Image (cartoon, grey):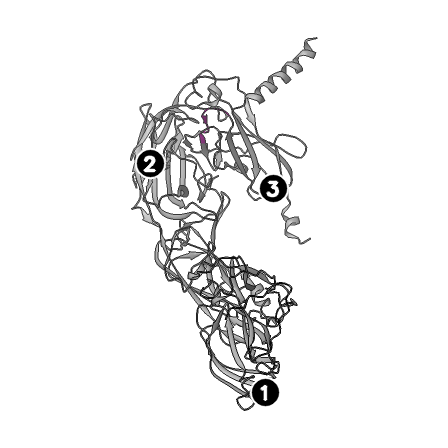
Amino acid sequence: MRHLLAPALLWTAVTAFSQTAPFTVALSAARAQVVAGDPVDLIVVMTNISDHDVDCTVNASNALDRSYTYDVTDGEGKLVPKIEKKYHGGSSVWPCVLKPGQSDTPGGGRISVLYDFSRPGKYTIQVSRPIGGDDQRPETVGRVQNNRAAVQSNAIVVTVLPKLEAAEPK
Amino acid sequence: MTFQPQPGVTYTLNSEHVVGFKTDPLGTSCGSWDNGPCFADPLGYYSVNPIGPVWPQMPNYTGNTSTNLVDVSCGARGGTCASQNMPVEVCLAESGTACTNSFNTPPYWLLATTSALFGLCPAPAIASVTPNIWFAGQTYSVTVTGSGFITPATATPACPVSAVDAQLGIARTAISGVSVASATQITFSITVPDGYVTEAAGVTVTNSNAAPANFAKLDLLGLPQILWKGNVVSAPVTAQQQAVVGQQLALTTTPTAATLAALPVPLTFSSTAPNTWTVTGGTNIGGYTATTASASVTPMPPLTTPNLTFYSVYPAGAVDLTYTYCISGQTTCPAATASFAVSGGGNMASNPFNFLTIDQLVPCVNGVVPTGGGTATPYVAYGNLVGYSCLVTYPPSIFGISFTPSGAPAGGTYSYVQLINSDDPWSTMGSTKNGCTYTIGVDLAYPYKGIIPGTNPPQAEDAPNDSLTPGYVETRTFNASMFLLWTPSGSGSIAVPIGYQTWGSTGGAQQEDGTWVASIGEPAPGPIGAFVQSSDETQTGPPALDYGYPVWSGPATCN
C-alpha cells in the first residue's frame, strides 16, 4: 500500500508547487541546428509571475550563467557528461531583482562550454533554476531554504549535423 | 432682370435675349470656387451630372468614370448667400482629404436663347495636346490639334475666336501667346508654377457659350514630395525637421509608381535613370542588429528606391537629403530636398574601487546556495564581496567598478554591452600551470546583465572574482570595454552608442605564511584611459567597432 501512495503524494506535491512557482523559465536555442564543432548557445528568459520581487542573480562564468542547472541528454536519452577542465575559471556575480510581471533580459549563454556537442545527433536540453528562500525573494535566498524545488524550463532539441553533411549541397 | 419661372408654365423667348439661370442670388456672393453656385433650386432643375438630361451637357472629361460632388458652404471664402447645401464642385481626383483635380459647376446656366443671337457654333474637338507631360517649373510651347477651332478670320459675333483654358489641379492657370492658327491647330505658351503635386492637368477649348467645350487631359508632374511620419518635409516646407539619434527616419515620396500609372498618360519611373537619394551630413546607417550571438551594423540601404529608411547615429546639425526621380522617356528629373537636425549625446561616468580584496564567500554547490549555510572560503575579487560565490549581498558588497549614464535626451532608454578584450587567468603551483585560452566577445549576453538593482537610470557594475586553491598562486589579467547605448522611444528606434570605458583588473593572490594576500599588477584595477565618446569609427579592436558601434561574433569564452 505504501508503494501505491508514494506516486500520488509526489503528484500532489508537484501540482502544489507548480501552482505557487514564483517565476517561469523560458528556454530557446540561438540556433536549433548547428554543425559539429559550432557553439551551442541558449537563450533563457526568466519571468516573475508572483506578486512580490524575485531574485534573478546572474552568476556569469565562461559565457554561461551558472545560476541555472543545465540538463543535456543525447538522442538515446543518456545524460551527456560535462567537459572536464583543470582550470575552474573566474566568475562575476551580478545581483538582479525582478519586479512582479517583469521579465529579465535574455541570459543563459554558451552551453557548449560545459557539455560536449561534438558528436552529431539530437540533444535535448532543459534548464532549471532552484527556488531560494521565501519564494526567491531577494536577500532571503541565503537565509531560508525551501525544499530545493526548482522551476523547470521547457525542453528543446538541438540538432548537431556532421561537418561533411552540412558542407554538401542538397 | 430677375426671372422666376413657375411650375407648370411654358415660356417662349421671342426677343434677342437669353434666359439664364444665375446660380447666385442677385446681390450675393457665394463662397464657392470661382464664385460657383450656392443657391436654392426650387424646380429641381439643377444638375452637375455630366450626363444629366436637364441642363446643358457638361464638358466631356475623357476617362472619368466617376465623380464626387462636393458641397461647399456658402460661408466659405467670404460668401454671403444663404446656404442651400448644393453641390458646387465635381471632384475628379482626390488625395487624402483634398481634391486635387476638379471642375466647378458654372455659376450661370443657359435656359433658352434665340438663334439669332446665339446660333450654334461648331463644336471643338481636341485630338492631341503636345507636349502632354508638363513638369512643374518648366515653360512649354503647347500645340493643340483637333477640329472645329474658330480662328480670328472665321470668327463671328455669335461665334468668337475659340477660347483656350489650361487647368492645373483645381486652378485655372494663366497661359499666354494664344494663337488659333487654323481650324485644326491652336498654340499657346504656359509656365507651370512650382508647388504642384503630380496629378492630371487639362486643356479646354471653348467655342462661345452655346457649344460644348472640349477637354483633353494630360499629365502634370510636380516636384516630388518627401514625407516623414505622414507629413511633407520637403519644399515648400522650409523648416528643418528635428530628430534624435537612433530614431527611425522612414521617408516616403511622391509620386509613387501607382500615381504615375494612374495619370491620364500612364507613366513609369525610368529604368535607366533610377530614383536617387543623396544624403550628406551625419553618420547614417541602415540599422544595428545585436544578439548575444552577434552584432553588426547594416550600412545605408541602396539610395535608388522611392522610399528610404535609415538612422542617424550621432548628433548632427544637418542631415541633408535630396530625392530625384526620372520618368521613362523624359529628360527632366524633378528633385526635392529636406533637412534634419539630429540631437543626442550623453556621457558615462565610472566609479572604480581600485583594489583587489580577499573575500570570504560561501561556495555554492552546482550554482545553488548550500543548505545549512556552508563554510566560507577565500576568493580574490575586484571589489569587496559579501555573501556566496553565486549570490552576493548588495549592499554591503562593493563592486569593482560601476558605471553611471547621463546626458541623453529625455524619453529614451539606456542599456549596456560589455566586450571582453582579454582574460588571462592562471593557477600556478610549481611547474603546474592551469589556465585557459580566451576568445574575445560579449560578456555573457546582450544586453549586459550586470545592472545594479534599483538604479534609474540603470547603472552597470562588474566585480570579477576567482576562487583560491591552497598552494596555488592565482593571477588574472582582465580587460573589458563597457559600452553605454541609448535607444530613443518610438516605433522602429534602434540603440546608438554613446561611448565606452575600457577598464581592467590585473593582479592575483597567493598565500604568505598561510594567509592569502592580494596583489595588484599593471595596469592597476580600474579604468584604462579616458571615456571614449563614440564616433564614426571602424576598427578590428579589441574592442571591435563599426561606425562606432560595438560588434562581436559571440560571447567571450575561456577554455
Magenta-span inclusion, residue B218: no
Is the magenta region chiefly helix, strand or loop? loop
* Identity, as a three-letter code, of the amino acid under mark 1: Ala
Q: Residue at (46%, 24%) from the top-left corner?
A: A52
Q: Around disc 2, counting alpha carbons within 10 Å, would you say few (fewer than 14), some (14 to 19), or many (20 or more)?
A: many
Q: Residue at (59%, 66%) from the top-left corner?
A: B262
Measuring from the top left, give residue B41's x and y in whole percent.
57, 61
Q: Nearer the viewer, mark 2 or mark 1?
A: 1
Disc marking residue B401: 2
Quadrant hosting residue A96: top left
Q: Around disc 1, counting alpha carbons within 10 Å, would you say few (fewer than 14), some (14 to 19), or many (20 or more)?
A: some
- Residues tagged by mark 2 and mark 1 found on one chain of the structure: yes
Q: Nearer the viewer, mark 1 or mark 3?
A: 1
**Image side of residue B157 versus residue B505, left or right:** right
Q: Is residue A56 above or below residue B79?
A: above
Q: Does residue A42 show up?
A: yes
Q: Label 3 belongs to which residue?
A: A32
Q: Label 1 belongs to which residue?
A: B183
Magenta-span inclusion, residue A56: yes
Secondary structure of residue under mark 1 = loop
Disc marking residue B237: none
Separation of disc 3 and disc 2 at Cα? 36 Å
Quadrant hosting residue B239: bottom left
The chain that hosts pointer 2 is B
Front-most of B522 and B68? Answer: B68
Q: Is residue B38 above or below residue B495?
A: below
Q: What segment is highlighted magenta in the picture?
A: A50-58
Front-most of A170 and A95? Answer: A95
Q: Earlier in the sequence, mark 2 or mark 1?
A: 1
Secondary structure of residue under mark 2 = strand
* Identity, as a three-letter code, of the amino acid under mark 2: Ile
Measuring from the top left, give residue B16's x and y in whole percent.
56, 80
